[in-house]
Image (tube, rainbow, N blue to C red):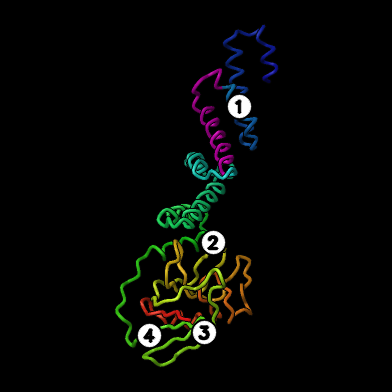
């Protein structure tokens, strides 16, 4: 039709030809966009707008195609901030446009991971919340959101536990012992930090408890987490044998050997017993 109209200039008035050319380019551009052929669609929509500037329907179709292509390009180039700006605008206009919901979810989720790794927990929570709205069934996004909320919730001040409890970690023996009123309650084999990632010695306390914490630096889950001290921007603590993202258990069979990245690792059943027994605030003594 476009070719035919170009040939018809000699017969029809110029205004009539331009009107028909506009309609042809605009209609073709919109159809190509609906088929996902956005680069081709843009070419025709731009030609239509040259013939009739600011036509609302064609302008909207052109802006949506441009935003999608810009957002998609920014996403795959790793510029998540620019990707979110373009994709948010497109999603507001039409949440069902192409796969904008999927791309926008991934952008928010990846920004959440980045903020969490940098210790910017409020920003991470905001990103995870946006991601969960876009994809409520995504288990990892839900888990990360829950973890960040746990970390941002100040622990309720707890008076000195009565009866008195304490945890003693003997690095030389690779043993963790729990006492209540100076009576031995638990005596577990453990693993402390390997050379270069040594567990810090000293007197600490249980700072927080998370049922299943995510170790983003090493991409592992740490069940029955109890943080005991800060090592730079990250906490070290006591937890069960870590779980890899594929569900396999890390360091199984190595308990009793310094093998961790600095934490104190217990067998899973032992970690659960200790987690259920210990309260936030009880002393943790790590000694040679």
Residue 121, given in percent of the width and then of the height, sits at 42, 57
Residue 249 or residue 55, whichever sits in front: 249
Residue 28, given in percent of the width and then of the height, sits at 63, 27
Q: Select label 3 or label 1 by which is in front.
A: 3
Q: What is the number of the mark on residue 179?
A: none
Residue 147 is at least partly visible in this image? no
Q: What is the number of the mark on residue 165?
A: 4
Quarter of the image where the N terminus is located: top right
Q: What is the number of the mark on residue 175?
A: 3
Q: Select label 3 or label 2 by which is in front.
A: 3
Residue 114, given in percent of the width and then of the height, sits at 50, 53
Whether pointer 1 and pointer 4 mark residues with C-beta atoms closer than 8 Å, the reply is no
Task: Give yes or no for residue 54 being in the magenta stretch.
Answer: yes
Q: Label 3 to label 4, Cα distance in Å?
A: 17 Å
Whether pointer 4 and pointer 2 mark residues with C-beta atoms closer than 8 Å, the reply is no
SS of the residue under disc 2: loop
Residue in the image at 43% along x and 83% along y: 167
Residue 27, given in percent of the width and then of the height, sits at 61, 27
Q: Which residues are magenta?
A: 49-75
Q: Label 3 to label 2, Cα distance in Å?
A: 26 Å
Residue 124 or residue 239, whichever sits in front: 239
Residue under label 1? 27
Which is nearer the N-term, disc 3 or disc 4?
4
Residue in the image at 59% along x and 9% along y: 14
Residue under label 2? 217
Q: Label 1 to label 4, Cα distance in Å?
A: 76 Å
Q: Label 1 to label 2, Cα distance in Å?
A: 51 Å
């Amino acid at each position: 039709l476009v070719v035919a109209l170009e040939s018809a200039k000699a017969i029809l008035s110029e205004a009539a030809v331009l009107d028909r050319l506009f309609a042809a380019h605009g209609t073709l551009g919109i159809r190509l966009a609906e088929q996902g052929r956005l680069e081709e669609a843009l070419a025709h929509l731009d030609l239509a707008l040259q013939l009739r500037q600011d036509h609302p329907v064609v302008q909207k179709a052109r802006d949506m195609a441009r935003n999608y292509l810009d957002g998609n390009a920014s996403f795959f180039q790793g510029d998540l901030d620019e990707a979110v700006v373009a994709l948010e605008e497109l999603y507001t206009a039409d949440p069902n446009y192409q796969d904008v919901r999927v791309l926008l979810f991934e952008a928010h989720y990846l920004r959440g991971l980045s903020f969490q790794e940098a210790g910017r927990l409020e920003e991470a929570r905001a990103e995870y919340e946006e991601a969960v709205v876009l994809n409520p069934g995504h288990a990892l996004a839900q888990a990360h959101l829950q973890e960040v909320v746990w970390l941002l919730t100040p622990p309720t001040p707890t008076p000195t536990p009565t009866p008195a409890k304490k945890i003693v970690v003997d690095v030389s023996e690779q043993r963790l012992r729990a006492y209540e009123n100076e009576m031995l309650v638990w005596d577990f084999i453990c693993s402390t930090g390997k050379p270069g990632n040594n567990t810090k010695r000293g007197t600490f306390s249980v700072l927080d408890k998370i049922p299943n914490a995510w170790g983003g630096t090493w991409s592992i889950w740490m069940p029955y987490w109890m943080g005991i001290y800060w090592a730079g921007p990250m906490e070290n603590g006591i937890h069960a044998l870590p779980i890899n993202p594929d569900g396999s258990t890390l360091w199984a069979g190595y308990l009793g050997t310094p093998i961790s990245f600095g934490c104190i690792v217990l067998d899973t059943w032992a970690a659960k017993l200790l987690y259920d027994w210990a309260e936030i605030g009880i002393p943790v003594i790590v000694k040679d």
